[in-house]
Amino acid sequence: MNKKNQKNLTTLLYLLAFIEGGAVMCVELCGAKLLSPYFGTSIYVWAAVLGITLTALMIGYYLGGYLSEKYKKHHTVLWLMLTGGFLVTITPLIADIILPVTINLPLLLGTILSLMLLILVPLILFGATSPMLINFITSHADKSGKSTGTIYAISTLGGIFATFLIGFYTLPKFGITYTLLGYGILVLTYTTYLFVHTR
């Protein structure tokens, strides 16, 4: 791959990191909103949401680091994003099945189990993308620190943007289902474009 194509691919992967960061916050915020009619919005619920989110990201970061050593092609990270995007789009359907059952459990158990079934896997997949993107973008060991900081900064920026967009606009205006569906389609569409563009 020549330098121009490498630069173009790097730019596209930076945008993927931005979308991934937004996806994490979308799943987190909408996950909490999905639980609210069943388990409320108490500090216990939000603590569970944050705890499961951090647990998923921890697993994802480790998984991404492991996969980046085994699979050198960038298509691996695209498959992770495609799977995560698909799970985001069907989260409301899964919630309609799970939550009427878990509501019969004690508050803490029901909340944690619901979140594990609803948001754990997609967040693991999204979390795994950052280490893999860093591995693809870093061409020299002495640039690894800069690449790492750039990817995490862009991902966090995407999360900040999505938090305000979802919290102040899409959730109040369109509701949980359409918010998840819209962001899931965004992830699927952009990732599919990358597949086609980088064949």
Image (cartoon, grey):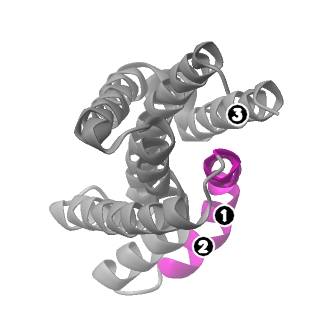
Tell me: 2 left or right of 117: right
Residue of label 1: 94
Q: Is residue 59 above or below residue 165?
A: below
Q: Decide which of 5, 80 is in the foreground and name it.
A: 5
Provide the secondary structure element on which disc 2 rests.
helix
Provide the secondary structure element on which disc 3 rests.
helix
Residue 148 is at least partly visible in this image: no
- Identified at 57% across, 33% down, the residue is 179
Residue of label 2: 98
Q: On the rendered image, what quadrant is the C terminus found in?
A: top right
Q: On the rendered image, what quadrant is the N terminus found in?
A: top right
Residue 83: percent from the left, percent from the top? 69, 54
- Identified at 50% across, 64% down, the residue is 69
In the image, the segment drawn in magenta is 74-102
Verify whether residue 95 appears in magenta.
Answer: yes
Q: Amino acid at mark 1?
A: Ile
Instruction: Give yes or no for contact between labels 2 and 1 (Cβ–Cβ under 8 Å).
Output: yes
- Identified at 77% across, 34% down, the residue is 192
